[in-house]
Image: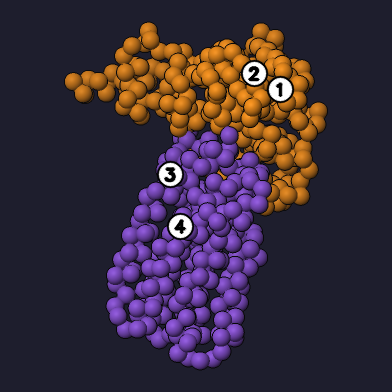
């Protein structure tokens, strides 16, 4: 019985791989015995999507937003707008699970992210308004360590390509990040997007301190991620040069 | 999809923190010199009476090691918290408690291990004999990781607070007391010729206890600090 079970799982798995679609990351769940049941009831598989259900958030005594219901499907981008202090960062951190909501829940494939924990973390990249890079390490070292810790390929060649993709030339790779400009530091942080194959991206003001050229690089990268079936939530003040049918808007107001 | 194994994640954190410590060699040197100077002040202040020095030696050396650990606790999470690396660490698909063990280990290698290695030399200033020097080193080898583990809870709880340096001292010093008593007790009993096994065993028990509880408590405190 067990043998049939595992064989079936494997064949469905290969199927998914051959389909080559964005849902290939179901494969991760196959490692977890508890989730195998998904493969037996395809009708009940919640599609890859991120949902918020009646989400309410506050900082201290002040309520920031309430009753937010959004659904992010593969290939779409949610642009979160709002004044300063309207809770864009809190909203993004809540979607990552760094901040717990006052009420409501964030669901990934129909399951509460607080229950999924590490399984959910393996699906996402979060780039906050802090860059999350070490000033005393070089960009290459920063990237290598970040990729290694995320379980991605961290070979020098791949890291070099990622840094070049954000327009950081080779001489910069070996300087301490401390001596780089704000925009260059931001580029180093964003270079992680070129290393990873995770489907969910949460970007907090990614265009802040980027120049026009880097903005184009990033927009192109977002576009290719979306066309591969990725999902993006981005908080931004500027209009995105992306096809309008793939962009949803959410405006937080005080 | 990418998910690091436990050893990969642990190794990654340790490697990063040791690499950073290499770039900040002055920080490491400072805590080493702190221990040397404080331990040397006592013979200078108390006078060269060998019997007195032998009596106060174990306690002085242990308190010195404890203060050195306390001073270095501020470095454990603060930098990561300020540059956003901590929130990235919290999003690594591995248990945060495991990553905390990695951070504490790297911190101990940089701040505790030099004290352990230096202790026989410092013990000589207090006229301790060969066996006692061995016991002193062993007790510090068991005790300093325990101090780092317990200290990590305090460091995580006070993360992002104003005046956290003093608060962390108030929080963790009471918790350091059992380690100090058993550690200094092991050396004292060796000085007076009674076996030190009992105290060393208790010190080992403290280490195991802190190793099994502190990482989880620290991980919870870090998540709260990040909210």
In this structure image, what is the colour of chain B?
Answer: purple
Disc 3 designates what residue?
A: B216
| Chain the render paints orange | A
- The answer to which of marks 4 and 3 sits earlier in the sequence is 4
Q: How crowded is mark 1: few (under 14 residues within 10 Å), some or many (20 or more)?
A: some
Q: Which chain carries label 3?
A: B
Q: Residue B175 — which label? A: 4
State if disc 3 and disc 2 touch (CB < 8 Å). Answer: no
Instruction: Have a look at marks 2 and 3 and say if they share a chain.
Output: no
Residue B122 percent across, percent down from the top left: 51, 80
Mark 2 and mark 3: Cα distance apart in space: 32 Å
In this view, the residue in front, B213 or B116, is B213
Q: Residues within 10 Å of mark 3 (few under 14, many from 20)?
A: some
Instruction: Have a look at marks 1 and 4 and say if they share a chain.
Output: no
- Residue B38: name its quadrant: bottom right
State if disc 3 and disc 1 touch (CB < 8 Å). Answer: no
- Residue A11: name its quadrant: top left
Q: Residue at x 47, y 81 (%)?
A: B56
Q: Which chain carries label 1?
A: A
Instruction: Have a look at marks 2 and 4 and say if they share a chain.
Output: no
Residue A130 percent across, percent down from the top left: 68, 38
Instruction: Pick out the residue farthest to the bottom.
Output: B49
State if disc 4 and disc 1 touch (CB < 8 Å). Answer: no
Disc 4 secondary structure class: helix
Q: Mark 4 lies on which chain?
A: B
> Which quarter shows the N terminus of chain A?
top left
Instruction: Have a look at marks 1 and 3 and say if they share a chain.
Output: no
- The answer to which of marks 1 and 2 sits earlier in the sequence is 2
Disc 1 designates what residue?
A: A86
In this view, the residue in front, B7 or B84, is B84
Q: Which numbered disc, 4 or 3, marks the residue closer to the eye? A: 4
Disc 2 designates what residue?
A: A65
């Amino acid at each position: 019985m067990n043998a049939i079970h595992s064989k079936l799982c494997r064949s469905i798995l290969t199927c998914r791989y051959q389909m080559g679609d964005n849902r290939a990351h179901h494969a991760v769940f196959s490692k977890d015995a508890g989730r195998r049941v998904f493969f037996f009831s395809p009708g009940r598989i919640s599609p890859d999507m991120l949902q918020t259900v009646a989400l309410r958030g506050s900082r201290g005594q002040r309520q920031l937003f309430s009753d937010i219901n959004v659904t992010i499907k593969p290939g779409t981008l949610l642009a979160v707008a709002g004044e300063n202090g309207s809770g864009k960062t809190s909203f993004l951190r809540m979607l990552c699970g760094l901040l717990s909501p006052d009420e409501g829940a964030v669901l990934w494939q129909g399951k509460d992210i607080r229950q999924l924990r590490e399984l959910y973390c393996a699906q996402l990249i979060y780039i906050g308004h802090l860059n999350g890079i070490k000033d005393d390490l070089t960009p290459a070292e920063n990237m290598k360590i970040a990729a290694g810790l995320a379980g991605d390929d961290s070979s020098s060649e791949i890291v070099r390509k990622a840094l070049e993709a954000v327009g950081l030339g080779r001489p910069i790779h070996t300087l301490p990040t401390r001596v780089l400009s704000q925009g260059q530091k931001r580029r180093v942080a964003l270079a992680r997007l070129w290393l990873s194959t995770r489907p969910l991206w949460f970007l907090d003001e990614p265009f802040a301190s980027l120049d026009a050229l880097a903005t184009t690089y990033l927009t192109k990268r977002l576009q290719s991620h979306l066309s591969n079936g990725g999902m993006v939530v981005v908080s931004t003040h500027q209009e995105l040069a992306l096809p309008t049918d793939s962009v949803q808007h959410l405006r937080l107001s005080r | 999809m990418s998910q690091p194994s436990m050893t990969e994640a642990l190794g990654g954190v340790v490697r990063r923190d040791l690499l950073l410590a290499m770039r900040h060699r002055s920080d490491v040197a400072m805590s080493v010199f702190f221990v040397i100077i404080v331990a040397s002040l006592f013979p200078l202040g108390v006078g060269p009476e060998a019997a007195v020095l032998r009596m106060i030696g174990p306690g002085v050396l242990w308190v010195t090691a404890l203060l050195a650990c306390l001073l270095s606790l501020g470095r454990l999470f603060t930098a990561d918290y300020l540059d956003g690396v901590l929130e990235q660490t919290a999003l690594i698909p591995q248990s945060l408690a495991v990553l905390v063990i990695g951070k504490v280990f790297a911190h101990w290698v940089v701040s505790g291990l030099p004290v352990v290695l230096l202790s026989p030399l410092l013990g000589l200033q207090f006229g301790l004999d060969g066996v006692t020097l061995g016991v002193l080193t062993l007790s510090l080898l068991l005790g300093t990781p325990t101090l780092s583990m317990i200290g990590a809870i305090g460091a995580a709880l006070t993360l992002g607070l104003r005046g956290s340096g003093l608060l962390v001292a108030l929080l963790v010093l009471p918790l350091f007391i059992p380690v100090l008593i058993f550690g200094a007790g092991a050396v004292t009993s060796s000085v007076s010729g009674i076996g030190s096994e009992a105290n060393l065993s208790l010190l080992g028990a403290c280490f195991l206890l802190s190793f099994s509880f502190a990482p989880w408590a620290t991980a919870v405190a870090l998540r709260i600090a990040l909210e």
